[in-house]
Amino acid sequence: MMHLLTSPEAWAALVTLTALEIVLGIDNVIFLSVIVSRIPEKQAHRARQIGLALALIFRIILLSLLVWLIGLTAPVFSFSGYGFSWRDLILIGGGLFLIAKATHEIHAEVEADDGEGDQKSGGNAFFWVIVQIIVIDIVFSLDSIITAIGMAQDIEIMIAAVVIACLIMYISSGPVSRFVAEHPTTKMLALAFLVLIGVALVADGFHFHIPRGYIYFAIAFSAAVEFFNVLAKRNRRKAGKPSV
């Protein structure tokens, strides 16, 4: 352990892996922000805490099961000449879940459903949110940890990077959730991102890798446009002019 603290290579691996884990965690934060936006604020805050705590726990558990995890990439059956592993099946299932959930939420937004039904159900709505968070945490954790295994050799570095990334996700999740809740157009944009991420997960499951750089560039560009749109609306409101 001590040799890692004095090794430049270990610190470089930690910084690189932490940055990668933070980028991969963006998907988790976006999903969390959207899913908790339809329940009351107090429950939403608790759901974010539970969701991010579970994300950290799942990642550490998966890191502790490295041998089993590596075995997940071994093919369990073949179809049309392609071998599918448990990892592939989990990514396909998680991607389809994301696409279905985002599509359902987009439909609710288009139909002007303000979520009152969810809020009236109280505990049931909160329980269902937690179930969905658990499902998607498992999917994102699996992808994140398999990436970590491919980039670092020491489990101490992997755990440190995961803990740091989850702390940053926790700090950023509150502001992101509030921003999404306060700006309906931003929520629609976030839902579109979830569809895009879901498609990428399904494609990965079918061994067709879409470079994540393309996806994150699209997210960053769209987010920048939306930021200026929100800023323009706020300035027009201050000036007393009707927003478009």
Image (cartoon, rainbow, N blue to C red):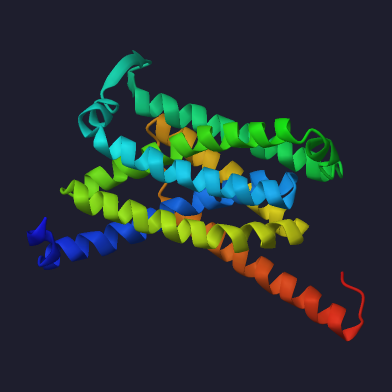
Quarter where residue 55 is shown: top left
219 vs 153: above or below = below
Tally of numbered discs: 0
Q: Nearer the viewer, residue 86 or 125?
A: 125
Q: Nearer the viewer, residue 101 or 116?
A: 116
Residue at 32% x, 59% y: name it: 18
**Is residue 155 something that shows in the picture?**
yes
Quarter where residue 58 is shown: top left
227 vs 144: above or below = below
Is 98 situated left or right of 183 in this image? left
Residue at 37% x, 37% y: name it: 142
The location of residue 154, given as percent across then percent down, is 16, 49
Is 84 situated left or right of 203 in this image? left
The location of residue 237, given as percent across then percent down, is 86, 78
Residue at 54% x, 49% y: name it: 49
Q: Quadrant of the C terminus?
A: bottom right
The location of residue 149, given as percent across then percent down, is 24, 43
The location of residue 239, given as percent across then percent down, is 87, 85
**Is residue 188 something that shows in the picture?**
no
The single residue placed furthest to the left in the displayed view is 3
Q: Quadrant of the N terminus?
A: bottom left
The single residue placed furthest to the bottom in the displayed view is 239
